[in-house]
Amino acid sequence: MQLGMIGLGKMGGNMAARLREKGHEVVGYDVTSPERDVDTLAGLVERLAAPRVVWVMVPAGEPTAATIAELGELMDEGDLVIEGGNSHYADDRVRAKALAEKGVGYLDAGVSGGVWGRQNGYGIMVGGPAEDVEKARPIFDSLVPDEGVGFVHAGAVGAGHFVKMVHNGIEYGMMQAFGEGYELMVASGLVDDVPGTFESWREGTVVRSWLLDLLSRALEEDPELSRLRGYAEDSGEGRWTVQAAVDLAVPAPAITSSLYARFASRQDDSPAMKVVAALRNQFGGHAVHRAETSDDIDV
Amino acid sequence: MQLGMIGLGKMGGNMAARLREKGHEVVGYDVTSPERDVDTLAGLVERLAAPRVVWVMVPAGEPTAATIAELGELMDEGDLVIEGGNSHYADDRVRAKALAEKGVGYLDAGVSGGVWGRQNGYGIMVGGPAEDVEKARPIFDSLVPDEGVGFVHAGAVGAGHFVKMVHNGIEYGMMQAFGEGYELMVASGLVDDVPGTFESWREGTVVRSWLLDLLSRALEEDPELSRLRGYAEDSGEGRWTVQAAVDLAVPAPAITSSLYARFASRQDDSPAMKVVAALRNQFGGHAVHRAETSDDIDV
Amino acid sequence: MQLGMIGLGKMGGNMAARLREKGHEVVGYDVTSPERDVDTLAGLVERLAAPRVVWVMVPAGEPTAATIAELGELMDEGDLVIEGGNSHYADDRVRAKALAEKGVGYLDAGVSGGVWGRQNGYGIMVGGPAEDVEKARPIFDSLVPDEGVGFVHAGAVGAGHFVKMVHNGIEYGMMQAFGEGYELMVASGLVDDVPGTFESWREGTVVRSWLLDLLSRALEEDPELSRLRGYAEDSGEGRWTVQAAVDLAVPAPAITSSLYARFASRQDDSPAMKVVAALRNQFGGHAVHRAETSDDIDV
Amino acid sequence: MQLGMIGLGKMGGNMAARLREKGHEVVGYDVTSPERDVDTLAGLVERLAAPRVVWVMVPAGEPTAATIAELGELMDEGDLVIEGGNSHYADDRVRAKALAEKGVGYLDAGVSGGVWGRQNGYGIMVGGPAEDVEKARPIFDSLVPDEGVGFVHAGAVGAGHFVKMVHNGIEYGMMQAFGEGYELMVASGLVDDVPGTFESWREGTVVRSWLLDLLSRALEEDPELSRLRGYAEDSGEGRWTVQAAVDLAVPAPAITSSLYARFASRQDDSPAMKVVAALRNQFGGHAVHRAETSDDIDV
C-alpha cells in the first residue's frame, strides 16, 4: 500500500527501506535528509492519495508535536496518522482528540528493534481503534519479523506507547541485571574467562536472550570493555516507566534501581554522598579532624 | 565414555538419559529412585573402571557434602568428582582440597536449563584444572545443546559455581523486571491484551528471551495468572549473589531488590511496615486516636 | 496581628489556637466546623481589615485549589494568601501567577509537626517574595517552637512546598530504616528486649531523633505492635519526591524504596510476584507440575 | 569500681577519661599510646584485683580476636571480659564459649556516640548473662548519658553487637535519606537557602534528630560542602546488617541501597554501567557507530 514516512533517520529510513523491499510505495520526507522524496510536509500530503496514511518517525517531544500539529492542518477527514516515535502515552490521547475533531485518525505505534530491525523485522505495539489498525495492517505485517508475530493491538489510543514504555522499562532492568552480573564476575577475581562465560550462556541457559547475544558480541570486540566508560544515558522511557509506577502505586524496585544506576553513572561527584561524608566527618568531632581509624567511625 | 551419576531426580535423571542417548555408559545411583543401577555408593564406585568419573547431582547442602565426603573415602588417586549441584563456590574449594590430599580430582559444574535441558541441552559452567576438564570433556560436549556452544571453563575450582550463581542472580533480575512490567500493564487499565503484548515481544524486540517465551506460555495457559498466588520462594543462589555483592563491594540494586521482593511476597504481615504504621499513628497524637484526614498525616 | 484561617481541622484548628494564645486575632472559617467564626469565605474576607492575610489550611488537591480560586475573586490588591497545606510546588507557581494579576500576594508554607505542633511549635518553610514574608512574619514567629528557630525562607514561590516535600521524603526514608531495623531484631530471635533497645537509643546514640522517641512510645503502648497491621498508606508527598528525583535525575534509592515498601504493604497479592511464580513453575516443565525439590528450580 | 581498659584510641581513651571523672579506677593499656598505665597485657591483668573486669576497645577483626585470645590465657575463673568494639555477633558466641571453658565471663557491648560520647555519654547495648551484666553495672551507669537511660541489656551473648549492628544499619538509612534530600534541593535550583532549610528543621519537624544537628553544623562550616568529595567508606557494620537481612529473609531495601550508594561512590568507573553502555552501543548496529540521536536508542 501507499505510505507517507516522515523522518528518515536510522529508524524511519530503515523502516521505509524494509517496506519498499516488501512492495509498498513509500513517500519519504525529512527536514534534512537528501533521501527525501518531497521537500515539504505539504508536498508529502499532496503526493499521497486520499485516504492517506502517514507514519511519523521523528525525535520525541517538540519535533513530534510540531509535526503532528502541522499534519492536523494539512490532512483531511478519513486520513490516518501513525505516531511511531517515543511519545508519552498521555500525549497520544491529547493528539488523537485534536485530530479527531477534523476526522483524522490516530494510532500510536511503539516500535522496537533498533537498526537491526531492517533485516530482522520490528516489534510493533499499537494503540487505537480497531478499524484504523485494519487500515494500516499491510504496513504492520511488513514491518514485523514474520506475518503473525511481533505485533500486538494492545488497546485504545495510548496503549501502544504505554506497552512500548513498559517494554523499555523491562529492558532497563535486564540490562542492569547483566551489568551487575558482569561486575560481580570481574570483581571476584575468580573468573578467568568472562567473555566466554557470557558466550556460553547463549544456549541452554535461563538467561539466554537477545541482550545476552549483544553483550557477548560487545565482549568479543572489546573483552574488558576498556574502550567504554561506565556512563549511561537514559532516554525518557525509563523515567516514564518509573513515573507510571509511582502514579499507579506499583512497586517497581528493579526497574527503578536500573534508572538510578544510570543517573549515578553520570555524576562526577554525588551531592548525596557528600552529605554522608560530611556526617562521617562530624562523628569524628570537628570537621577539621578527619576520622582516621575504624574505631572512630562505627559510632 | 563411562560416568557414574549420583542423584537421579529431575536434573540428574534427565542428564543421565541425555548422556545415554548420546552413547555414553551411565551407571546411576540414587538414595531412593527405583531407576538406580547400583544400590550403594560403594557399589557405584566398584562398578566403574578406574580412573573413575562421578557426577554428583543431589540436593545442595548436607546431602551434597555427605556424598562428596563418602566419595572421598571410596575413590582412588586419579579419579574425578564433578559436583554439578548448586554448591557455594567457597565450599568447592574446601572439598577440592580435601579430595586432592588423596589424589582425587574435583570439578565444580554449574548446570542451567531445568527440565527442558534433556531435549534442549544444558548450559554448563565449569571450574577446576584444565586437565580434569579434558578428562570429562566428552560428557560436557554431550550435555550442551550443540558441541561448541553452551560450555565454559570459567576458571579454577569454584569458578563454575560462582558464574552459575551469578547467572541465577541475573535471572532473578530479569524475572523481576518482567514481573514489574506485567504489573504496570495490569494496573494501568490501558492494556486490553496483556498476554498478546508479551507474545508480540517474542520476535523483533529488545526483550526477547527464553524467559519471555516461558512467560508467554504461562499467560497462554492462564491469561490472568489467576491460578497462582504472588508468592515466590528463593533458592539460595540469589542470596549468595547478594552476599557476594556485599563482600566484593559491588552495588547490585536490581538483583537485590528482586530477592527482597521475593522475601516480601512471603510475608503475611510485615513487621517493618507495622513500624511505619505505628509512627504514622503517633503523628496523630495519641495512639488511640487514629489519624483520619490527610492533613494530620503529612507532617 | 490579624489573620484569617481557612480550615479548622487538626492542623488549622491547632494553629489558630496557638496563634490566639500568642496574642493574635484569628478569624476562623471552615466548611463544617462549629468552631468557625464566620459562615462563608466571603464573610471571612469581609471581617478582615485590608490589607488582609489569609492562611489556607484545607485538604490538598481540589479543596485547596477551589478555596484559592474563590479567594482570588474575593480579595483585593495588597492582600496576601498563605497556602499552608500540602500543595505541589508546581501548583504554587500557577496560583501565585493567577493571584498576582489581581495584585494579591501568595506565599507557600510547608508546615511540619502534626498535632504535637500546638504545644511544641511547628517547623515552617516558606516560599515567595521577601516583602510578603515580612508581612506575615509575626505569624511565623508565633508558630515556630521559639523565635529564631524552626523557620526558613527557602526561596521563591514553590520553594516552601518543595522543601516540605523533601522533608517528607526524608521522613519516609527514616521511618523505613527504623522499620527494617525493627524487623531484623524481631526476625533474629536474638533480641529479648526490642522495646528496651529502641528506648535505650534515645540518648547518646547516633540515631536519636524524634521519630525514635515516637517509636519508643508506640512500643511502650504495644510492645509487639500486635494491634497493628503492616499496612501503610502514603500521602502524596513521597510520590512527589520520587517524581522530582526522576525529573531531576537524582538517584534517590532509599526514599524510593521506602515508598515502594508502602505500596507493597497494601497489596493482598502481587501481580509481579505472580509472574515470578509462573516463571518458576515453567522451569519445572509443564505448569501443572509444580516444582518440588530444589534441584528443579535452581536452573 | 576498678576496670582494665585495653585500647586508648578515640573511643577507649575517651571512655576511660569519662569513667575516671565519674570516680572509677581505670588501668589503661594500649599497644602504642604513651598514656598507657601498663606496658603489657600481662601487666594489666596483674595490676587488677580479682575478680577482674576488662574492657576491650581495639580495632575490630584480628586485633580484637588476638587480644581476647591472649586475655583467655591470662585471666582466671570469675574474671570478666567486655568486648566493646565492633565485633560480629557470631564471633561473640565463639569467644564466649572459649572463655567459658576457663570460667571467664564474656559480655558484648555495642557502644554508640563517637567522640561526642565523652561529654554527652554513650549509648550502650549489652549481650550476655544477667549476672555478668550486674558485675559491670557501675561502669555502664557511668558511660551512659544519665543513669537509667542509654542502656539496654538486649539478650544473650551476641545480642549487644547485633543490636549495635542494626543501629548502624538504621544510621546508614538515615544518612542516605538526608543525602538524597540534600541532593534534591541542590538539583532543583529552587532552594536559595539549603543550609538554612536544614537548620530550620532542627526544631518542630518530624525529621529532627542528632544527625540533622550534625548536618546543619557541617553546612554551617561549609555551606556547599565544597571541601568534600562525594566519597563514602563503609565500616563493616552496614555490610553485616545486609548479610543478616539476607540470612533472615528480611527485606531491607532502604538500608541496602544506602550501602550500595557508598559502594558506588567509591568507583571511578562502574563495570556494570560499562555493560549498559556497551549494550546501548550495540543497539546502534556496529560498535564503531555510536548511537547519536534518540531515535536509535529507544529501541
Image: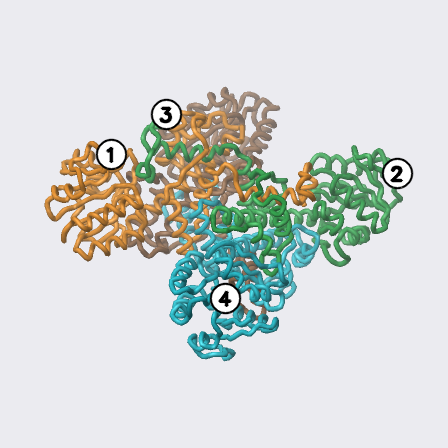
Chain colours: A orange, B brown, C cyan, D green
Task: Say which chain tag 1 marks.
Answer: A
The label shown at residue A238 is: none
How many residues crowd mark 1 within 10 Å: few (<14), some (14–19), many (20+)?
many
- Mark 3: which amino acid? Glu
Asked if badges 4 and 1 are on one and the same chain, I answer no
Q: How far is disc 1 from disc 2 in space, using C-alphas? A: 85 Å
- Residue D178 image offset from top left, x and y in percent: 56, 49
Q: Which residue is mark 2?
A: D46
Q: Is residue D213 above or below residue B101?
A: below
Mark linked to residue B295: 4
Picture coordinates of residue B46 (x, y %)? 52, 27
Q: Residues within 10 Å of mark 3 (few under 14, many from 20)?
A: few
Q: Tell which subunit mark 3 falls on.
A: B
Give the CA separation, mark 1 to mark 3.
31 Å
Tell me which amino acid carries mark 4: Asp
Mark 4 secondary-structure assignment: helix
Q: Mark 1 vs mark 3: give the one in front.
A: 1
- In the rendered structure, which amino acid carries the disc numbered 2? Glu
Query: Which one is in front in this view, the residue at disc 4 or the one at disc 1?
Result: 4
Q: Is D96 located above or below residue A93 in the figure? A: above
Check disc 3 and report the residue beneath it: B147
CB-based contact (under 8 Å), mark 4 and mark 2: no
State the separation of the CA atoms marked 4 and 3. 67 Å
The residue depicted at 78 percent of the width and 42 percent of the height is D13
Q: Secondary structure at mark 1?
A: helix
Tell me the residue at 58%/70% (across/down): C19
What secondary structure is found at the residue carrying circle 2?
A: helix
Residue C148: image x %, image y %? Answer: 62, 59
